[in-house]
């Protein structure tokens, strides 16, 4: 009888945490915000770097802008799918 009570107690204490889905995060993780800010800073610095560098500076600016756009789309998706509030 004691084993049944112990099993019931463990089930009650452990199961809710493992069976119920985790609530969504409240906001964008800090690492994502930090990465987005770093990309914006890099974009700004390259804009003011001068010279064309054979077109590669402009191409790098485009890639950075695409990365920022991807992060924005990822955040939008996460909000639509309730990964974040």
Image: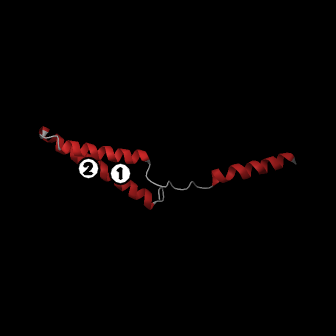
Residue at left offset 83%, top offset 49%: 4
* Residue 18 point in image, percent of width and height: 64, 50
Residue at left offset 34%, top offset 47%: 36
- Density class for disc 2 (Cα within 10 Å; few <14, some 14-19, many ≥20) is some
Q: Quadrant of residue 35?
A: top left
Observer-nearest residue: 15 or 68?
A: 68
Q: Which residue is at the far top?
A: 53
* Residue 75 point in image, percent of width and height: 39, 55
- Density class for disc 1 (Cα within 10 Å; few <14, some 14-19, many ≥20) is some
Residue at left offset 71%, top offset 50%: 13
Image colouring: secondary structure
Give SS at disc 1.
helix
Disc on res. 4: none
Q: What is the number of callouts on the image?
A: 2
Classify residue 71 as left or right of residue 4: left
In this view, 67 is above or below 84: above
Residue at left offset 80%, top offset 47%: 6
Q: Are marks 2 and 1 in contact (CB under 8 Å)?
A: no
* Residue 41 point in image, percent of width and height: 27, 44
Disc on res. 71: 1
* Residue 34 point in image, percent of width and height: 37, 45
**Mark with earlier residue (2, 1):** 2
Disc on res. 65: 2
Give SS at disc 2.
helix
Measured Cα–Cα span from mark 2 to mark 1? 10 Å
Q: Which residue is at the far bottom?
A: 80
């Amino acid at each position: 009888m004691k084993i049944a009570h112990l099993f019931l107690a463990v089930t009650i204490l452990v199961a809710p945490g493992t069976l119920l889905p985790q609530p969504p995060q409240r906001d964008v993780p800090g690492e994502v915000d930090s990465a987005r800010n770093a990309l914006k800073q890099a974009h700004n610095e390259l804009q003011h770097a001068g010279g064309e560098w054979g077109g590669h500076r402009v191409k790098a600016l485009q890639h950075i802008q695409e990365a920022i756009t991807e992060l924005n789309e990822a955040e939008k998706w996460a909000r639509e799918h309730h990964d974040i509030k």
